[in-house]
Structure formats: C-alpha cells, structure tokens
Image (spheres, rainbow, N blue to C red):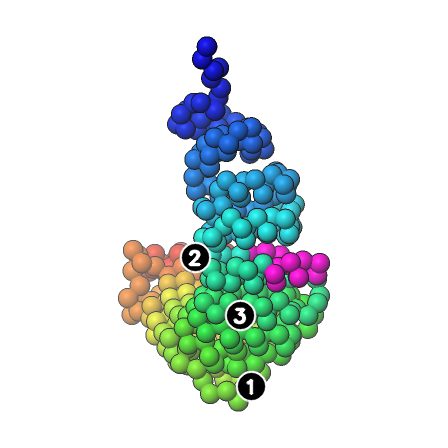
C-alpha cells in the first residue's frame, strides 16, 4: 500500500500559491514550521521579501529566528524602529542574524543603554560585511559604541543621532566613508565639535551632514575631501569658523544656521554656487533683498530653493528682476526653479505678484512649512 501523500509532497509552485492565500505573516510561518519542505517553500515564496529585515511584533522573537534561519541568505539590511514596529533590539534575533545572514550589509537601529553591549558584540562579529550603520540613541549615555564602529574600516555610510561627545572623534578612523551624518539630539545645548578634525582623514567623503552642533576652529589642515564634496548640510548649527571651499557642491542645506561673521554665509554660497542645484536656506543673520538677488546670480544651476524671504520687501519690480535673473541663468518652463517659501505671508504676496509677472512659468511656487 502506498504511503499517504501530504501537503509537503506538493511542488514548490503549488505551495507558493498556498502561501499567497495566507494573509498574515504569522500564519505563513506557522505553516512553514510543520515540515522541512514547507520551510523551504516558505523561503521560495518570500524570495526578496526579507532583503530588508525589520523585526516587529507581528511575530515573537522565536518566530523571527525561524524566518532568519530559512531566509537569512537574502537579508542585506537589519532595521529596527521600535516606535513604529513595537519591537526594539533583541539579542536572540541578533545572534540568528550573525549565524544565518552572511550577506548583511546594513544595520539601522535605535539604541538604548541596555542594548549597548549586545550591539557592540554584533558589530564585532559582523564587521567584515557591514558597509552602512545608522544609530538613533534614545537615552543619554557615553557613546563608546562609536569606538566599536570605528573598527569597521570598510564602512561607507554612517549616520549617528545621539549624545555627541569626545567619542565622535573615533569616526576619523573610518577612512572609506562616503556619507556621514552627525546629529546632537539635545537641542537645549550645542556640543562643540571640531568637524574639520573629524573629516581630515576622510578623503572619500562626498555627503556630509551635521545637526545641532557648534562647529569650532581647527588646527587640522584642510582635507582634499572638501574639494570633491557634493552634498553639505549644516542644520541648526553654530558656525564660528570659515569652512573650506567646496566647488563641486550640488546640494546645500543651511537651515537655522547661525554664523558669527556678518555676510560670510552669502560669500560662501557665491564662492561655491557654480554647480549648486538644491539650496535650503534660513540663516541668522538673514539674507536681505539685495543679497537674495546676488545669490540667484551666483547659482546659475539652482533649480530648487527653500527660503523664508522673511526680511525681504516684495513688490512687482523685485519679482520681475528675479524672473529676469532666472532667464539669464538658463531656467526654462521645461526646467523651472522650484521656489519654496516657508513664511506663509511672503508666499501669499509672492504668488500675487508672480501672477502679474511676464514669464512667470519659470518659477514653480510652493508654500513650505511655517
């Protein structure tokens, strides 16, 4: 008598269809645990679904371990965001990733004090494969974890939000970095950071973001990195020094930037604006009406401009002059300037005046946040 056939005897293609009819991930995992072949069918069904592995409360940690065992070879990114998924860093899941995810390239996680040792251990074990790390610190504690990160010498992307302290200078060891973001999470005080010292060895860096820090003077010689930098963001920062020139900049964000040297911000933009395509600007002290026109003339490739225009008096001739400058810059209706004005009253006045201005189609006008 023949052995009775079971669901496990069905071809993978048929099992794939069965898994598709199961709405919830938990149901699929429960079925896949019933037989070894069903586990393989589950992996076949998921294909690239877990390329970005984002553990959540949809499954228990133990069930996530099973998913990792079956689909780990496809995992390239481990992503934790407890605020949206309800599940924070879990050591059981981390150990499974170390064992079953040889192709992991990226880690993004929030960090609590209780998780630091486990995350450090994970980084040490995965340092040969990781090229991108993102940390969001949720409590105040020393950032010794950055010392561990600094040993991942092939790291290309690092984003760190947290308690910026002396440990931030360990970043200097990451000589392969191409993209770096540092954000001090405590907005009531700005930590003094020698940004030029951090960046001096990072010759491959092309994208730099600093948020809520005080950029202080440096004795370090300017790095070659600045000459090739493509994107620079200094958000809610205080600037007490002159920055190295960045002639290749295409993206500049200087929202809520405070600068002690009067007129320096405009001079910097004009000196480095030849290739600038995107600019976010809201400085202290603010850019005045004449400076605004100079800025447009000095940035001929600019096609996205976010600005408050807070202390600029708007009238018909002034708006016409703006449009004329844009014409000279080569702006066309097919390739217009997207102008985003963050002060509602200024946006309303500009809109009224623009409607009566010839060649108004050279500007796509938007209202930004207040």
Residue at the image position 65 percent from the left and 69 percent from the top: 143
Distance, label 1 to label 3, CA atoms, is 27 Å
Query: Which structural element holds mark 1?
Result: loop
Residue at the image position 34 percent from the left and 56 percent from the top: 361
* Mark 2 closeness class: few <14, some 14–19, many ≥20 residues within 10 Å: some
Question: Is residue 339 in sight in this rendering?
Answer: yes
- Residue 365 shows which numbered tag? 2
Tell me which numbered mark, 2 or 3, is placed earlier along the sequence. 3
Q: Horizontal and vertical percent for residue 128?
A: 48, 62
Distance, label 2 to label 3, CA atoms, is 47 Å
Tell me which numbered mark, 1 or 3, is placed earlier along the sequence. 3
* Mark 3 closeness class: few <14, some 14–19, many ≥20 residues within 10 Å: some
Locate residue 245 relative to residue 185 in the image: left or right.
left
Residue at the image position 51 percent from the left and 63 percent from the top: 127
Residue toward you, 298 or 125: 125
Q: Which residue is the site of mark 3? A: 151
Q: What stretch is highlighted in magenta?
A: 108-121
Residue at the image position 39 percent from the left and 27 percent from the top: 13
Residue toward you, 40 or 74: 40
Q: Which of marks 2 and 3 is in front?
A: 3
Locate residue 25 relative to residue 139 in the image: left or right.
left
Locate residue 202 relative to residue 310 in the image: left or right.
left
Q: In this view, does 197 lie above or below 251?
A: below
Residue toward you, 366 or 123: 123
User: Are discs 2 and 3 less than 8 Å apart at CB?
Assistant: no
Q: Which residue is the site of mark 1? A: 217
* Mark 1 closeness class: few <14, some 14–19, many ≥20 residues within 10 Å: some
Distance, label 1 to label 2, CA atoms, is 39 Å
């Amino acid at each position: 008598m023949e052995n009775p056939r079971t669901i496990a005897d069905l071809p993978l293609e048929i099992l794939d269809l069965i898994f598709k009819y199961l709405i919830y991930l938990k149901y699929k995992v429960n079925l896949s645990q019933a037989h070894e072949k069903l586990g393989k069918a589950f992996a076949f069904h998921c294909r690239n679904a877990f390329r970005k592995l984002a553990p959540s409360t949809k499954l228990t940690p133990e069930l996530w371990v099973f998913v990792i065992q079956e689909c780990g070879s496809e995992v390239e990114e481990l992503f934790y965001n407890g605020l949206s998924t309800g599940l924070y860093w879990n050591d059981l899941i981390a150990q499974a990733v170390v064992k079953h995810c040889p192709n992991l390239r990226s880690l993004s996680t929030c960090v609590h004090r209780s998780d630091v040792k486990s995350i450090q251990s994970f980084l040490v074990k995965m340092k040969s494969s990781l090229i991108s790390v993102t940390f969001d610190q949720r409590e105040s504690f020393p950032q010794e974890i950055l010392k561990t990160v600094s040993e991942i010498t092939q790291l290309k992307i690092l984003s760190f939000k947290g308690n910026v302290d002396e440990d931030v200078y360990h970043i200097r060891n990451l000589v392969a970095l191409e993209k770096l973001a540092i954000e001090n999470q405590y907005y009531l005080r700005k930590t003094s950071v020698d940004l030029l010292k951090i960046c001096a060895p990072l010759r491959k860096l092309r994208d730099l973001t600093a948020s809520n820090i005080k950029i202080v003077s440096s004795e370090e010689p300017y790095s070659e990195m600045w000459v090739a930098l493509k994107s620079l963001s200094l958000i809610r920062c205080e600037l007490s020094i002159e920055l190295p020139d960045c002639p290749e900049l295409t993206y500049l964000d200087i929202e809520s930037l405070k600068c002690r040297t009067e007129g320096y911000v405009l001079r910097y933009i004009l000196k480095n604006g030849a290739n600038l395509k995107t600019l976010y600007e809201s400085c202290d002290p603010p850019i005045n009406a004449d400076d605004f026109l100079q800025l447009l003339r000095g940035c001929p490739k600019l096609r996205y401009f976010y600005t408050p225009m807070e202390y600029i008096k708007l009238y018909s001739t002034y708006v016409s002059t703006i449009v004329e400058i844009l014409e000279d810059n080569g702006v066309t209706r097919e390739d217009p300037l997207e102008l985003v004005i963050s002060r509602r009253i200024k946006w309303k006045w500009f809109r009224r005046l623009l409607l009566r201005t010839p060649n108004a189609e050279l500007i796509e006008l938007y209202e930004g946040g207040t």
